[in-house]
Image: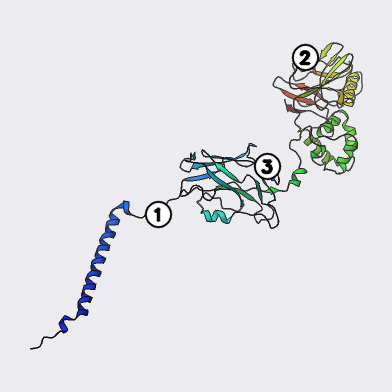
Amino acid sequence: MGISTSHFSPYKCRESLYFKVHEEVERSLRARIRSFSRSPSLRIQAPQPSTLKLIFPKALTVPIFTGGKIVDEESNQLRVLLVDTRGNQTVLFPSPFKVDIVVLDGDFPLDGRNWSNEEFDRYIVKERTGKRPLLAGELVVTVRDGVGLIENIEFTDNSSWIRSRKFRIGAKVAGGSCQGVQIREAVTEAFVVKDHRGELYKKHHPPTLGDEVWRLEKIGKDGVFHKRLASEGVHTVQDFLKMWVVDHAKLRTILGPAMSEKMWNVTVKHAKTCVMGNKHYVFRGPDYKVLLTPICQLVNAEINGSIYTTHNLSDINRAYLENLVRKAYANWCSLEEIEGISDEIGLLTQGDHPNHQQPMVGSSQYKVYMTDRLIEGYIQNEMQANREISPIYFNTSSENGVRQNMFPSNSDDDLTSPKSFITWG
C-alpha cells in the first residue's frame, strides 16, 4: 500500500515554525515594554528647560546716541550676569566662557516666556547695506565667576530704519562655549537710538554755568538770538545770568522784539535752574572787599574794615554799594575766585543769622525788607515818593544751607526782571 506524502509538506512545516517564532518575539517585546513601564529609571525623559540664564542687572542710560558709549543707569559700564532662575542667584560656572553681544529688533517678544535659540537668532539685526557694523566695540565678553564686563560698545547707526524704530541689546553664549549646557540669553528693554548730531543741539536740563548760551530754551545754535548775545560778549549761561542780574533791561534789549515775552520767560526760567556750584568771587579795592556768587550776586561786603552781612547793610549808601557790584561785573576777569569753603567766606559771613524780615539795603530815607519769597518792588516813605528798587541780585543764607536769591518783582509770574528763588548749597 502506498503512503501519501501530502501530510508531510515541507512548506507547511516552515510556515508553522515562522508563526511560532513570531508569536514568541511579540510575547517577549510585550513583556519588555511592561518591564520598562514598571521601572521609572528606564523610562525616556523629556528634556527639561534650563534654569540658567544671562541677565543685564541694570537698565541702560537713555537716550542713546550714535557714537556715544553705552552705559547703565548709574553711568557705569554694562555687566552681564549668569544666574539661576530658581533664586536669581549668581552662578559660579566651573570655567570662564564667552558671550556674544548682539543687537535685537525692539519687537523681540520679551514677555517672560522661554524662547528657543532659533527664535532669538531670528530677531538679531544686522547693519544696513553699505553701512558699518551696527554695534562697534568689544562684542565678545568673557564671563568669569558669573560676571562679564562689557566695555566701550557704541551704535554706529540710528534705529529709525526698522519697523519698530527701536533696538534691544542681547547677550548669548558664543558657539563652542558651555557645550552640553543650556543657558538662556539676556535681553534689555527696547530703546531708541538717535543720531549724534541730535545730541549736539540738545538743551541741558539743568544747564551748567559753563554751558554755551544756546543750550538755553528758545536760543538756537547759530541762530539770531545766539549771534546777538555773542556780539555783546554773552557766550555762556553764566554770562547770561550775570547780565540778567546786573542789567536785565540791557539783556532784554539785546534779544529784541523778535523774542516774545513768552519766549523770554521760558528762557529766563530755564536759566534760573542752573547749578551754581560752590565757587565765590572776591572784588577788592583800597577800602572794600565784596563777596559775590558766580552770577554777580552780592553775598557780603567788608567796607573800611567793617564787615556787613546781607542783614546789616542798611547803613551802607545804596548808590555806593550798587556801584561796587557794577564795577565787579565790569572787571569780572580780574576777580579772585574762591572754590569751596574758605577762610575768606567764613570771615565775611560771620554773624550772619537770618530771620524772616530784616532790613537788606537802603538809605536813611527808605529801606528794603526781605520777605519769604521776594523783595517788594516799592517801599513808601513818609517823606519821599516811591522809588523803584534797582534789580541788584542779593543773597541770603540760612542755617540749613539754603541760598535765597532776592529779586524785586511786580508779580510771581513776571520773569522779565530778577526776583527771589532758592538754590540749595
Position of 118 compared to 394: left or right? left
- Image vertical order of residue 419 relative to residue 49, above or below: above
Q: Nearer the viewer, residue 149 or 416?
A: 149
- Give coordinates of residue 42: x percent, y percent: 32, 53
Q: CA distance from mark 3 to mark 1?
A: 44 Å
Q: CA distance from mark 1 to mark 2?
A: 81 Å
Q: Visible in this render: residue 193?
A: yes
- Give coordinates of residue 398: x percent, y percent: 72, 20
Mark 1 closeness class: few <14, some 14–19, many ≥20 residues within 10 Å = few
Where residue 142 is drawn, which disc sits there? none
Q: Secondary structure at mark 3?
A: loop
The mark that comes first in sequence, 3 or 2, is: 3
Q: CA distance from mark 3 to mark 2?
A: 45 Å
Farthest bottom residue?
A: 1
Residue under pointer 1: 46
Q: Nearer the viewer, residue 170 or 222?
A: 170
- Give coordinates of residue 215: x percent, y percent: 79, 39
Q: Residue at x 74, y 44 (%)?
A: 199
Q: Secondary structure at mark 1?
A: loop
Residue 152 occupies which quadrant of the picture?
A: top right
> Pointers 3 and 1 in contact (CB under 8 A)?
no
Q: Residue at x 55, y 53 (%)?
A: 120
The mark that comes first in sequence, 1 or 2, is: 1
Residue under pointer 3: 69
Query: Which amino acid type is marked by label 3?
Result: Lys
Residue under pointer 2: 347
Residue 263 occupies which quadrant of the picture?
A: top right
Query: Which amino acid type is marked by label 1?
Result: Ala
